[in-house]
Image (cartoon, coloured by chain):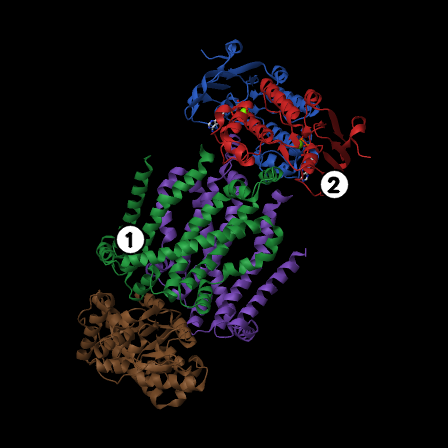
Chain colours: A green, B purple, C brown, D blue, E red
Amino acid sequence: MTDPRAVTAISLVGLLALWVVAAALTADPQILPAPGALLGPFWAELTSGELLYHLSQTLIRVIWAFVLAMALGVALGIAMGRSERLNRWLDPWLVVFLNLPALVLIVLCYLWIGLNETAAIVAVTLNKVPNVTTVVREGARALDPGLDAMARVYRMPWTTRLMHVTLPQLAPFIAGAARSGIAVIWKIVLVVEFLGRSSGVGFKIHMFFQLFDVGMVLVYALSFIAVMLVIEWAILQPWERRVRRWRTA
Amino acid sequence: MTDPRAVTAISLVGLLALWVVAAALTADPQILPAPGALLGPFWAELTSGELLYHLSQTLIRVIWAFVLAMALGVALGIAMGRSERLNRWLDPWLVVFLNLPALVLIVLCYLWIGLNETAAIVAVTLNKVPNVTTVVREGARALDPGLDAMARVYRMPWTTRLMHVTLPQLAPFIAGAARSGIAVIWKIVLVVEFLGRSSGVGFKIHMFFQLFDVGMVLVYALSFIAVMLVIEWAILQPWERRVRRWRTA
Amino acid sequence: QDLPVIRAAVLQIGTVNWELSTIVDNGLDEKHGFELEVQPYADNGATRVAVEGGEADMAVADWIWVARQRAAGKDYVYIPYSKAVGALLVPEGSEAQSLQDLAGGKVGIAGGPLDKSWLILRAYASREHEFDLAAETEQVFGAPPLIFKSGLSGELDGAINFWHFLAKMKAGGMRELVNVEEAAVALGLDPDTPLLGYYMKESFLSEHEGLAQQFYDASQEAKALLRDNPDEWDKLRPQMNASTDAEFEALKTDWIAGAPERGPIDLESMDAFLQVMNDLGGQELVGQATTLPDGLFADVE
Amino acid sequence: MIRAHVREKRFGESRVLSNIAFEVAPGETVAILGPSGIGKSTLLRIVAGIDTAFDGHVETPERMAIVFQEPTLLPWRSCLRNLTIVHPDLSEDDARAMLGRVGIPDKAGAFPLQLSLGQQRRLALARAFAGRPEMLIMDEPFVSLDPETSETMLALTERLIAEVRPATLFVTHAREEAERLGSRILELRGTPATLAPRLVQNGELP
Amino acid sequence: MIRAHVREKRFGESRVLSNIAFEVAPGETVAILGPSGIGKSTLLRIVAGIDTAFDGHVETPERMAIVFQEPTLLPWRSCLRNLTIVHPDLSEDDARAMLGRVGIPDKAGAFPLQLSLGQQRRLALARAFAGRPEMLIMDEPFVSLDPETSETMLALTERLIAEVRPATLFVTHAREEAERLGSRILELRGTPATLAPRLVQNGELP
Ligand SMILES: Nc1ncnc2c1ncn2[C@@H]1O[C@H](COP(=O)(O)OP(=O)(O)OP(=O)(O)O)[C@@H](O)[C@H]1O
Ligand SMILES: Nc1ncnc2c1ncn2[C@@H]1O[C@H](COP(=O)(O)OP(=O)(O)OP(=O)(O)O)[C@@H](O)[C@H]1O
Ligand SMILES: [Mg+2]
Ligand SMILES: [Mg+2]
């Protein structure tokens, strides 16, 4: 089994089989419908345009929050990892914001900024920045002092240094934070949407959960997951392969 | 300003000052009460035993889920990072579980396992394992092949290799995953508690949110954060200093 | 001491607790031959998961929801608890006199797009004023506390919320623009339809013959006590979260006004109501329950 | 006994080694010479079983010790632990004695990054010598050392080889070193590298 | 002009360097000798401005180049990019030419980890020579190289120094190397290390 595509396909089929078995064991389509039972509702939502509309709304929020959170988080993480002094000052804040419940931040954002898009994105970003910072900070602490000395002696400008010395070393940390980051962001977006937006996958999922319609909840959840799988294969993995080439070549 | 304790204290006071200013600007104790206004309710909850009871319930869940998620996540992360073959098989599952909304997993766990403590802890663990795996996998991919060859040639038993070769290299990744991990776990525990437990900080926070009693929400949220700060200072930071000694010595 | 036990999963802050507390405190459960055990949860969804997961025997929901579940194959049975009481409120300074005046404004709705009050008001607007409320206004669906707060702050031009928040919003100065009860009457619906109720599994009820009636009796007796005996309210006050006497009185009056008359359910008016809901909300709201499912309503009187 | 026959080793398109065969008997010491980049380290890695992506086969005894071209220590463990982790049977006293023999008796508690590069290389030598290997592989073991220290290390190596009699294979750029330690010299030449004919007759497989 | 006066350098409790003062004029080449672990690299790091936690002061020109004891390359960038990133003014042709001069003309597109250690060291030399440094610091630049390659590198260094005339300070263990390149030799001795008196008269500060 060496063709990666085949492996991925078989693996996904296995997951589907697991679901079929679980559905059969549960034997209650209201608790866990079989995959086949979702095709009809999925098609209906797709052709009505509902699914695409809500999916795109959620994606826009996820992308905004992701870009903002990664940029801020990486910058803060590098700064705090490199300067023990700065770290000592900011660390208590980091712990507090890291552990502030999503609900609290989201509600405060909605109340301060208003029940609008800006508030939603700010809330998600604020929720996620501390996570990115925490992971990247560890990476920045583990930077190679030898390369650092080299960059210093050869008087590299800071942009060169960032691009060619720091970021490549942080790549595994950033990749980890990014991948688990999108997931966390999308989960927070779900909460943000059901607490105060009128569109998006989270809004729909919550509505269908209220109706106890597990099937539709799954239709929406899995649609997003499908998008994530595509992003994983089309963007993340090729990028990672390129960035990691020097290790394996 | 070189005494770390003093810096931490001042930093926290700064955060408090920020809060006071924000509260004054908001000028609505229903939206954001000033810190002083929380002392009374805090004391009442403390002396009634309510706060400690719910806090301890939540902590027990967090600790269980944390230990389980870290153990499973690190093991899976190492395995997937080291074996490209295994990774190819499991990666699609990882992406799916990473992006499965917490709500879906939690509700399914409750319905399958029952509305009990086991279900709650399993739900949180399942939610968190993929995150840990993702971060640790990146670390395992970046392991030094030189040390690996050394361990192989000298025929190190796998336990020795894990303890002295692999885990020390993964330490920054594990530290990052652990720290952001506790935070994520506690956020999921909040959801788990409001979706199906009758105790815990999450239960109380959601209840007070329904009543729009932001003050009590903050009392409970901040109590947990205080616990996390203590854990950070009493356990995590000393441990990290010890583990990082070889870099800075 | 072999009384059957009813485990009730309820929102810890739900108003249904007032009734259940009264039942337990006055021993009405044992008097009517069962034992009531209240399990508090923090979220409506949680109470439903509890019943479905077999961890509780009873929870509260609106009957359209119960009908939908029953039509989808669940053996849920409905026992009335409370009538619909809702309204659309406008901020203190608002000049709106009818729903049409909200055109171009922002309406906050706590229960989501399938909120019954919202649907009834939409039907009312289109029938009375030929005015498409959904198209002419911007809707903001949000958590009840956020709608409460945004409503009071004037960010919204109109707000529909769950009734205990409505009481507080009115106490906070907001004005009732349209009452859902009036709207229902105008639509030819029976305003006495008990929209909210308890539901239990049929399998559970059949294990204990007559239990539905026994519980209904206890519920009715508690309602009577609360209606006739102000002292009972004083006992409840600590759990009512009323910050002022005015709020307390408003909550009390509204609650009593919402208690439905004793008696069997009028299937005809229920069916009429369901048809209206089906027209408005469609399958998304009622699921497969396009007609009243058999055995939905417990046989109580 | 080391028996190696590398028919071919390539990195992608470029062939690095071709048709190299030799044996090293227990107690025998073979030096490998050759210009930088010819494939000496690659050959050692193949013999040590680290690189298995080649065409050919290698037979080696079980207990081996290796000195890489770079120190390859565990930077997060003290010098002493670097010896005792790799050799769990080694007593702490013996480990300390070993540190003494390579000239860093006072560094037992230090971390590798607190050593000079020469000291790190000596620690790597100590690690290789501390077991009783049946087979010893060393990639330029005595560079980065001043003449005096280098002499000490050479003498130490000679003693170890005389005591334990492992099959030894080592790379060096210094012909004196090769001639002093080696009972035989293999010289790599050309692209892809082969054994220079004049030196290998007695070591070549049939 | 390099002017250095290190009154004292200690790591924790242990004093490594004590009262070392010297100057290196532009075009002058000074070799540093001394046993392994004495403090040569530490001294170079202080002069290069990498280690600032010492008692004393150092004055150096702005444009410097360094060859560390280990290659210290950017493993995630190709060999060519390793030159052009550090020297943005260097044209790609010049960079390729430089790779040719250190004997790895075919490795422009390879990543450093695909090089042998000797090739990596030569790349590090190429990096140092590619700028026109006013000051050149080298820590054992010619180890791990076979005699022939080593000779090529030495010649290349001599030519660079003659062309650009930087103030050069380098560590070596090979006295021939020191004598061939160095216009002066500083020898470190003792604990803490000081300059061995017989060699420093003319280099010492007043
Ligand atoms: N970070 C450190 N902490 C403590 N001691 C250190 C540290 N770095 C170096 N030393 C010690 O300082 C001394 C000098 O080290 P240095 O690296 O300068 O030696 P060197 O002369 O370059 O030796 P070599 O020829 O082996 O490279 C050594 O004894 C070493 O153990
Ligand atoms: N991973 C790799 N991918 C591609 N080429 C490689 C790789 N590793 C080594 N090479 C090439 O193989 C050849 C031999 O490398 P090797 O490290 O064996 O040389 P060496 O004889 O040990 O040289 P040195 O004396 O400089 O250490 C070199 O030309 C090198 O560029
Ligand atoms: Mg080599
Ligand atoms: Mg040195």
In the depicted view, which residue is nearer to us: A80 or C43? A80
Image quadrant occupied by the C terminus of chain B: top right
Image quadrant occupied by the N terminus of chain B: bottom right
Question: Mark 1 — on which chain does it sit?
Answer: A
- The residue beneath circle 1 is A22
Q: Amino acid at mark 2?
A: His
D110 is higher (above) or lower (below) than C21: above
- The residue beneath circle 2 is E57
Mark 1, mark 2: which one is toward the viewer? Answer: 2
Percent coordinates x, y for residue D82 in the rendering:
60, 36
Please tell me which residue is depicted at 37% across the width and 90% down the height of the picture: C229
Please tell me which residue is depicted at 60% across the width and 17% down the height of the picture: D178
In the depicted view, which residue is nearer to us: B41 or D25? B41
Q: Is residue B235 left or right of residue C156?
A: right
Percent coordinates x, y for residue B245 in the rendering:
62, 45
- Work out whether residue B127 can be spotted: no
Question: Mark 2 — on which chain does it sit?
Answer: E
On the rendering, which quadrant does ligand 1 occupy?
A: top right
